[in-house]
Image (spheres, helix red, strand yellow):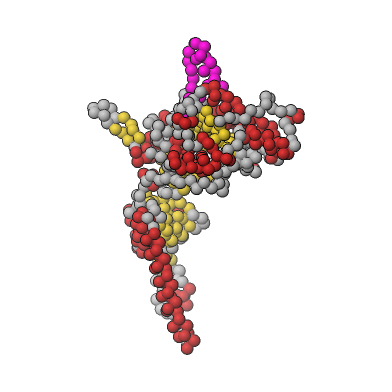
Amino acid sequence: METIKGYASYALPIATALVGVWLLWTVVRYVRADRGTRVSMRQAVRVRWGWVRLARMAGLTVTDKTPGLLAQITAQKDGPAPAPRVLTPRIKVKPDRFGVVVRAKTLPQVGLEEYQKTARFLADAWKCTRVSVLPDGPGKVVIRGVRSDPLTTPTSHRPTGLPPTDLTRWELGVDEYAAKVCVSLANVPGVTVAGTPGAGKTSTVNKFVCDFAPSPAVQIVTADGKVSRASEGDYADLVKRMFAFCGDDLDEANALFKRLVELRRRRSSTIRDVLGVKNMWHVGPSPQWPLTVLIIDEAHTYFREYKGSDAETKRLGALTAENARLVEDLVKKGRSVGILVILISQKTTGDALPTFIRDVCPIGLSFAQKTVEAAVAALGDDIRNWPDASPVTLQDPAYVGDASPVTLQDPAYVGVAVMAMQGRPGYTRIRTPYVSDADAARVAEATSDLTADPALCLDALLDSTGRTFPDGEGPDGAPVPLAK
């Protein structure tokens, strides 16, 4: 007993010191947090303290009539039976800028479905805009409650200038529950990006370029159909990191697409001998065999149909038809050799983007759209079954006098896109961050020395390995470096 009393005299000061350190750390975190996180920290305290009562009212508890081990030991033979126990799931609460993340355990008869049924009640009790419940492993669920809507909260992104750790991971932004949204680019032949002017299409692609520019294993080429020169358009700050660029001139675009198709053919004929695999994604991109990204902005410029009987109209019509054939070649055959095509257009209906190109692209994003037909073209017919997620709802009706309502872009949803996520049912709305022109120029300038022509990289790789093209002959026509 004397020994126990001696230990007890030390336990109280130690416990007091630990509690003091915990309180100090909590206060420091609270002071250093931003305003939104502070509100969420207070919200998290209320969630923890009120959970037992709330769980009972919401039906998230279960009654266990079997006595516990201690009750069985202390129960008297002729005494009353131990009272049933009411079991409440244990939770862990973590606050962030938008709300709280609650991780809870399941119980018999209180599983994922029961949590999902009470999501609306939990949102009201926690004063959240919306609450989602998803599985978090066997016997666990994660409850996400957002107090402020992430979709209407503009965010910005400052590129680090460091190479990405995973070249197959494209971080788009956050969804309506402030969870990060990423898509895999591995084995993806093409991406379509649609939306009305000023909705956020080009800004999203700018972020893609800024994030991947620090890697020498990624090379970018752009065709911008709304300008004649790079200095006139949205890519003026990024062109230093592009190994080639062309404007709205159909002849220049045609020559660029032909050279990329030639690169595709050379890679297809040598990939097994050089890389030892049939699919580049089995070994991943490298500076010697970089992922080649073709960005086609205002894609309808290069594919539109020209109708007329005069010689010039016929010539332009033949060029656009050939452009469509060449880009089709890149999308359908370029995946395994490391060529990715990103097509951007205000709408991706068949008259703007040929369906034999559009329908091969597995990833489709759509910013705000004016019509359901445009939304269906961008996201597929299933978007009709998800009206709450439709990009048409990102618009606001505006009335002009006594005229019929016209649809305008809701400023709160500029930068919000809709897409069908891999592995998720339905469609997801995503808040994409804004990248400033100054940051884009800084990254392009700092990484300009990494720019290289993939055709020259292939030449150097073949020379270093001593390999030749099939039958010991070069490709049809001497490979011509893509000039800026």
Q: Position of residue 319 (x, y in %)?
A: 54, 20
Q: Residue at x 33, y 56 (%)?
A: 125
Q: Position of residue 85 (x, y in %)?
A: 41, 68
Q: Position of residue 80 (x, y in %)?
A: 40, 76
- Outermost residue, bottom side: 2
Q: Position of residue 214 (x, y in %)?
A: 55, 44
**Which is nearer the eye, 168 or 377?**
168
Quarter of the picture holding the C terminus: top right
Judge from the rendering whether residue 193 lies leftward or rightward of residue 129; answer left or right: right
Q: Quadrant of residue 76?
A: bottom left
Q: Residue at x 40, y 61 (%)?
A: 29
- Outermost residue, left side: 402
Q: Quadrant of residue 325?
A: top right
Q: The magenta stretch spans which residues?
A: 298-325
Dominant secondary-structure state across the stretch colored magenta: helix
Counting every numbered tag in the picture gives 0
**Which is nearer the eye, 418 or 271?**
271
Q: Up-down: is 69 above or below 453?
A: below
The verdict on residue 318 being magenta is yes
Q: Residue at x 63, y 42 (%)?
A: 286
Q: Residue at x 48, y 37 (%)?
A: 237
Q: Is residue 415 visible?
A: yes
The verdict on residue 123 being magenta is no
Q: Is residue 379 visible?
A: no
